Structure formats: structure tokens, C-alpha cells
Image (tube, rainbow, N blue to C red):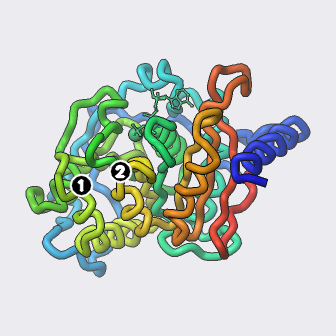
Amino acid sequence: MSIIEKAVQRLDQLKQASAETPAVSEESPAVVAPKPAVKSLLSEARPLAGADAASAPPQGITLKPATDHPTRVIEIDLGRLAKMGMVTPDRSKSTIAEEFRVIKRPLISNAKGHGAAPIAKGNLIMVTSSLPGEGKSFSAINLAVSMAMELDFTVLLVDADFSRPSVLPRLGLPAEKGLMDVLVGEVADLRDVMLRTNIEKLTILPAGMPHARATELIASEAMARLLAEMASRYPDRIIVFDSPPLLATTEARVLATHMGQILVVVEAERTTHGAVTHALSTIEECPVKMMILNKSRGQTGGLYGYGYGYGYGSDTRTETPA
Ligand SMILES: Nc1ncnc2c1ncn2[C@@H]1O[C@H](COP(=O)(O)OP(=O)(O)OP(=O)(O)O)[C@@H](O)[C@H]1O
Ligand SMILES: [Mg+2]
């Protein structure tokens, strides 16, 4: 059975399951109630908590003490986001919020080390796809917002599509300096480019200025140290990366080598089995790969919806969502 057929079969099973048992509810003990976590911009920007002074920062990149270096705060227009059909903290019962509640559960479980086997860097999650336009950025933002609605950890959404950054534009915000500027040494302190948002537990790290040597920079030792630092410094933080497509550039494949989990978006009725198989073969090393079928028609009354399917790594399985 092909991977896409498995995904469709999995979707049918989930649909059946949700018909038999109530959908993951706010009361379910497995789910932390996604209460609105909108914070007033009038309140002062809070420094990121939990910095562990013992862990060494990447060479050439400094992480100053939180107290003297507050992160800037930006405001995401939540009404605009909702109009675009995306997850927002104030609409926790929307169809899209319900869909991402199911999608995020196994990812969170693995990030927390509650899966079948412990996963190294399980809190580094890349959202990718085979081809352009399948819905990576849409899914990465929704996943990050949905995860930020949980109570017990914070989320850093990294725009890792360095040649075509789209997280800030998608949120209706202007381009900002970001990760690439830190990697080339134009910004010394990562905190200078991290943006807190009015969604209390969501911080954004923009892509920054496009750079001709982006692939080499992503593959660099400095990037590896920076990611290791980001993954270990804040144990209660999940980092979601919006990436380029796997088959169009080498950037996504290089980025994938740093990840603990990869969510592969497959556009229904467009992406071929061959493209998905090829894309998955480029990320074989990643311990956990999960697939979601995007833009499948007629689900839950909407034009678009998500289906959930799983592609597994050789030795680790994601748990079945509730
Ligand atoms: N589930 C969905 N429901 C509604 N619109 C969607 C959905 N998924 C994606 N889209 C829309 O499809 C378009 C492409 O999505 P998006 O930009 O997220 O794709 P991408 O894979 O990140 O593209 P790129 O490869 O260019 O980075 C956007 O207009 C987005 O709003
Ligand atoms: Mg994108």
C-alpha cells in the first residue's frame, strides 16, 4: 500500500474513531485546555525565562542574560488570522483548531519524550513538503499557534525558508532581521532578532536577509551549535521550523539533518506518490516523520481540510493521536 493510500486509510480510521468517541475535548485529560493566551501589548516585554547559564552559547553568538536584554514584542492581528482560516487562541473550537489538536498530539508526546522511544532533539520539529505551495507555512504557523495554546511549554516558530521567508508576511508583518543575520555575524545576539508576540507563549525567529550561501550556513558548525543550544537551553520549549520544499533546494535537506521530528505536508490530489517517496528518501535519517494530507476536499464541511497519515522512521513510531 502506498504512503498516500496509508494516509487516506489512516484518515478514515480517525474519522471512524471520532464518530464513535467524542473528539478530543477540552475536558480530555490528554489535552491541556487551549485557553486564550493573548497578552496585552501594553505590558512590558518579558525576557525569555529559564536560561541555563551552564550551557555554552555557539561560537560567536551570545545569549546575554535575560534581564538586560528583553525581546521585542510584535502584534499579530488575530482577526486577520481567523479570516484566513488559521488557528487562533480565541477560537479554540474552530475546525482548523480541532484538526491541529490531533496533528500536534503525537509531536508533543515525542517532544516530551513520552513516545515509544526517547527521541534526540524531539523538540526540534520541521514542517516541510516535497514541492512548493503544498501548505508548509500555513501548517507551520497553525501548528506553532496550536502548540502555544498548551500550558506547559513555550513555542519558538523559526522561519527557515531563507530564500522566500513567509512567516512574517503571512502574519501581515514586515520583514525583520533574523537567523541568517545571526549566522553571518551581522547580529551578535540571537535575542536581538527574536520577536515575542501577543500570543503569550509564541515567539518568532524570522529568517532574516536572504543570503547566497544559505545552504552552507545551514550546514555550518555554527548552525549546529545554535540549534543544539536552542534545543537544550529551554527544556520547556518546542521549536517549529517552516522550511523550503525538499525537492526544490538542498536547504531543507540540510536543515532536516538537525531535526528530531519532521512533519511532511502532502497536498491532496496534486502531489504524486513518486514525489512523496522521493522526498521521504531525502530525510531517512530523521527518527520521526509524520505526514499530513492537506487541502483534501469535503472534510468537515469545508473546502479544505487536513487528513492525518504517518510515515515512520526505521526504529521509532509516533503514537496514535487520541
Ligand atoms: N489547509 C488549507 N486551507 C486553506 N488554505 C490553505 C491550506 N493550506 C494551504 N493553503 C493556502 O495555500 C497557499 C500555499 O500555502 P503555503 O504558502 O503555506 O505553502 P508552502 O508549502 O509554504 O509554499 P512555499 O513552498 O512557497 O513556501 C496559501 O495561499 C495558503 O494560504
Ligand atoms: Mg512556505
Could you say which is closer to the camera, residue 310 or residue 144?
310
Are there few (<14), some (14-19), or many (20+) residues within 10 Å of tag 1? many
Dividing the image into four quarters, tell me where ligand 2 lies: top left
Q: What element carries label 1?
A: helix
Could you say which is closer to the camera, residue 216 or residue 188?
216
Image position of 289 (left or right of 309): left
User: Looking at the rendering, which quadrant does residue 287 occupy?
Assistant: bottom right
Separation (CA) of disc 1 from disc 2: 8 Å
Tag 1: residue type? Leu
Residue that mark 2 sits on: 158
Residue at image point 17% right, 46% down: 209
Residue that mark 1 sits on: 179
Image position of 132 (left or right of 115): left
Q: In this view, does 67 lie above or below 201?
A: below
> Does residue 155 show up?
no
Q: Is mark 2 within 8 Å of ligand 2?
A: no
Farthest residue to the left: give it. Answer: 186
Pointers 1 and 2 in contact (C-beta within 8 Å) = yes
Could you say which is closer to the camera, residue 178 or residue 195?
178
Quadrant in which the N terminus is drawn: bottom right
Are there few (<14), some (14-19), or many (20+) residues within 10 Å of tag 2? many
- Give how far across and how far down residue 94 sits, in percent: 63, 27
- Give how far across and how far down residue 58 sits, in percent: 22, 74
